Image (spheres, rainbow, N blue to C red):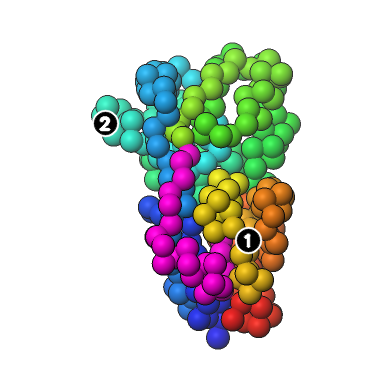
Amino acid sequence: MTALAGARVLVPRGGAWGERVAGELSRRGAHPVIAPLIRTAPPRDTTARDAAFRRLADGDYEWLFVTSAASVEQIAVFLSASERTVPTSLRIAAVGQATARAVTELGANVDFIPLGRSSAHAMIAQWCAAHTATSTGRCLVVRSDLAGAVVSDELELRGFAVDVCIGYRTVGIDLAPDVAADLAAGRFAIVLLTSLSVGRELRRQVGALPASTLVASIGPGTTRDAERLGFVVGHTARTQSIDALIAELDTLPRLQEVTR
């Protein structure tokens, strides 16, 4: 029997990501509940976003930097609607394996993924260590409205020509009343905490979670954010990866005692 067997787990995002995560949890014997706390929405300035995506399709950029799968999904929607494709000349840097998977599904190749922890800081530090400002090509950074300017600031500091595109907004979703009640009552064994946005919504809608509920964080950065919000994080993935988090949870020797 796996450590996750029988555990009721909150999956805080929907769509293809939520279905994939729920499927992996079910395969390990858990009982996932998909209850999205956030969703993506178009940016307030869709004209600027679409102009950047048109330039991308026209081959105006040498490098594309994407720090989330949601950024790639927005590009995919635009390309499909405009019947365009990713230029073969475009080189793409992805923040981690999940984002790289989205790029592959787009039909493009991934040229750079950082080693170790998946974060914007790790990606741009390792990328800059391997590249110099001798390139004359222009870079496009696609990010959410809430993400910091870590990548673009570092590129500009090193002399690269950079455009920044706000590809999407992150907005909150209200939980179903029964799910919120079950969270407050400790009827979930595990809550997957995947971002600061998820943590903020969870705190706003439910407040502090019972000690019997294991808060499992996708990475050290998310753990720091969650602790600032007042959560007690019971497990943090070693790398910023949902697959790693699930695998690690399934090997915790005392998970059944902690979460039942």
User: How far from the left and from the top, in percent, is residue 194?
Assistant: 57, 53
Residue on which the image places disc 2: 81
Is residue 24 visible from the viewing direction of this image?
A: no
Q: Nearer the viewer, mark 2 or mark 1?
A: 1
Q: What is the number of the mark on residue 208?
A: 1
Is residue 248 visible from the viewing direction of this image?
A: yes
Instruction: Tell me the element at label 2.
Output: helix
User: How far from the left and from the top, in percent, is residue 217?
Assistant: 63, 58
| Camera-nearest residue between 201 and 111 | 201
Disc 1 residue type (three-letter)? Ala
Residue at figure coordinates x 46%, y 35% from the top left: 169
Give the magenta-colored segment's residue range.
170-193
Residue at figure coordinates x 69%, y 37% from the top left: 121
Disc 2 residue type (three-letter)? Ala
Within 10 Å of the Cα at label 2, are there few (<14), some (14-19), or many (20+) other Cα atoms?
few
The quarter of the displayed image where residue 250 is located: bottom right
User: How far from the left and from the top, in percent, is residue 190?
Assistant: 57, 69
Q: Which quadrant of the figure contains the N terminus?
A: bottom right
User: How far from the left and from the top, in percent, is residue 63?
Assistant: 54, 26
| Camera-nearest residue between 229 and 196 | 229
In the rendered structure, does residue 202 fall within the stretch colored magenta?
no
Q: Earlier in the sequence, mark 2 or mark 1?
A: 2
Position of residue 72 relative to residue 24, above or below, is above
Q: Is residue 156 left or right of residue 202?
A: right
Residue at figure coordinates x 44%, y 65% from the top left: 179
Position of residue 72 relative to residue 243, above or below, is above
